[in-house]
Image (tube, rainbow, N blue to C red):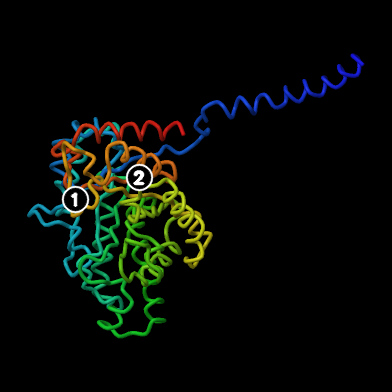
Amino acid sequence: MAQNNSRLLIPLIWMSIILLPSVLCAQSPRPQKQGAVEKKLIEWSAVEPDSRTVRKLADQFERSPFDGFVYRATTKTGEQMMWHIWGDRKYKIEEFSHVIDDFQSTNFWKLTDRFLRVNVTPGTVDWFDDNAWSVVLCNFQIAAQLARETGSIGILFDTEQYNIRLFDSEEMQKTYPYNPREYRAKLRQRGREWIEAINSEYPDITILMTFGYRAAQQSEIKNFRVGNYKYLAPFLDGILSACDERTKIIDGWEYAYGYRQECQFRDARRVMKHQAKDWTANRCRYEKHVQASFGLWTDYSLRDYGWDLNEHSKNYHTPFEFENRVRAALQHSDHYVWIYSGTPNWWTGERLPDEYIEALKKAKTAAQVE
């Protein structure tokens, strides 16, 4: 009987030896995957710094939790390029020589991922007007050259329709009455021309977008109506069809501004990485070039919550909630999470409680080991 029991024990012992490593692994913290991409935080203010501000405050901002930032380019007369880039104002690179000098004279050791902001404003260009469109192409070629010469990783392409709603299918067809098929073909053509102009100066550029293919779908995301962006899809199709093999397109997913739960980030990633492939004309090019990202707004919903510097429980994000939400965003992004702010100034520290700085630092630290 004892001999039979010992025979029964041998398989159990071997089974324990086999299972023990997996048990220990489940109880141990997960190490960072070998070769995993570092998750990075990008700062974007309601009033982006110009090159002079960057040069003046870069040393101070280097101590922030951020890995990069969005900035604006102004001419020598103070005109902001981003508000006129999609119009009839034709720029020359010489107008921004001081911007290049400011950046080249600044030592960056941590703030490696810098983005020049460009808009789709004023948008007063007929998609079918070749002469007018040539000005837009020239301006974005200058923007790409400026980004490259300032050592920036790319551009922040804000696709929000602040003035003319140039991606709104209904508004466009009222203003410029072409049929929908002609519009889709023309926007694909313009998308190809747009990225070719950019890539001619900066082939390995990174383009961080506020809205991507999701905005072009008819159904709207609850509590975040962005309006009609139907014609954004063929424009993006054109970009993907012609972009350089080294170009990266980042879907910034601005919808996440007010996300509260981790599952929202997880579901949004699924849309960007899987569902969106059904919305593009070329799934393979989408998989190769498009990455998932998220935007969070520090002082979100100001009208309803305000921004209390002392009683943080009154704010939309308390420091603890802010940390957890940034952490979840970093976990489900491919590379970037960008932090937008209206009232607090991450550059000067004005109207920015220390608790929010610490929350961001903790989220960033946690994301590197998950």
Count the labels in the image.
Answer: 2
Image coords of residue 223 (percent x, y) = 32, 61
> As drawn, which residue projects farthest toward the top?
2
Q: Could you tell me which residue is drawn at 40 percent across and 71 percent down?
A: 218
Does residue 9 sit above or below 89 in this rendering? above
Does residue 358 sit above or below 54 in this rendering? above
Report how far apart the C-alphas of labels 1 and 2 lie in the structure: 16 Å
Image coords of residue 335 (percent x, y) = 41, 44
Q: Which numbered marker is on residue 234?
A: none
State yes or no: discs 1 and 2 in contact (Cβ < 8 Å).
no
The amino acid type found where label 2 is placed reads Val
> Which secondary structure, mark 2?
strand
> As drawn, which residue projects farthest toward the front?
1
Q: Could you tell me which residue is drawn at 18 percent across and 65 percent down?
A: 90
Give the mark, 1 or 2, whose residue is nearer the N terminus.
1
Q: Could you tell me which residue is drawn at 36 percent across and 42 percent down?
A: 325
Q: Could you tell me which residue is drawn at 17 percent across and 63 percent down?
A: 84
Q: Which numbered marker is on residue 46?
A: 1
User: Crowdedness of circle 1 by 10 Å Cα count: few (<14), some, many (20+)?
Assistant: few
> As drawn, which residue projects farthest toward the left?
77
* Nearer to the camera, 89 or 119: 119
Q: Which numbered marker is on residue 337?
A: 2
* Nearer to the camera, 98 or 16: 16
